[in-house]
Amino acid sequence: MLRIGSNVSLLRQLGHAREREGLVYLWPKRALAKQQSPIRLRLVVAHNGRHPVHLVTSVLEERRLSDRQLLEIYRERWGIEVFYRHLKQTFARRKLKSTSAPHARVELEWALIGLWAMALYAEVQLARDEIPATRMSFALVIRAFRRVLRDYLHPVERGDGQC
């Protein structure tokens, strides 16, 4: 199952199979150039309240995986997708600095552990203040940790009025 963005063109009614509602094709340029057949997919469209969400799956038969089951799987995965988006964008790990695969793996594992640890600490603080965890901002959490790490050598002097 994949979420399809607006940058992906899906084709309909190519005549490669018995046509039915929800059947679409994806024909990558390389496959077309090699005269290979398109990929047959099932399209499921859901609405998230603001705009439609397009999901495709290679499971063509609804009896094996219903639209409702597909949407439930996607809903369950959404938190994971958002977390990795924060890792890549907010935590600036879209491109790793390591030059070898073993080092890149270690770098990625420590980045994951660091982000998880910061998020866990933030969730504990939010719970203490009776604020729902859904209100947590990864950007603000990272900014707060960076500020503490940057200023640890310059503690606030008592009595100078700064807090």
Image (cartoon, helix red, strand yellow):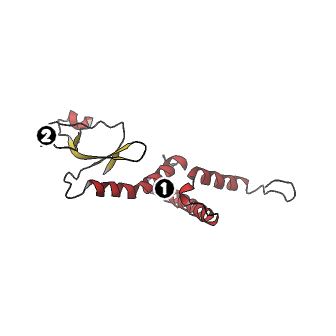
Towards the viewer: 131 or 108: 131
Q: Is residue 113 left or right of residue 62?
A: right
Kindly report which numbered mark, 1 or 2, lies closer to the viewer in this rendering.
2
- Residue 47 seen: yes
Per the image, the residue denoted by label 2 is 16
Magenta stretch bounds: 99-109
Towards the viewer: 22 or 151: 22
* Mark number displayed over residue 108: 1
Q: Is residue 5 above or below residue 159?
A: above
Q: Could you tell me which residue is drawn at 21 percent across and 35 percent down?
A: 32
The image position of residue 90, as x and y in percent, is 54, 48
Amino acid type, residue under disc 2 in the picture: His
C-alpha span from label 1 to label 2: 43 Å
Amino acid type, residue under disc 1 in the picture: Leu
Towards the viewer: 31 or 127: 127
The image position of residue 21, as x and y in percent, is 20, 43
Q: For mark 2, does the 10 Å Cα neighbourhood hold few (<14), some (14 to 19), or many (20 or more) residues?
A: few
Mark 1, secondary structure of its residue: helix
Q: Could you tell me which residue is drawn at 80 percent across and 56 percent down?
A: 156
Q: Is residue 81 left or right of residue 13?
A: right
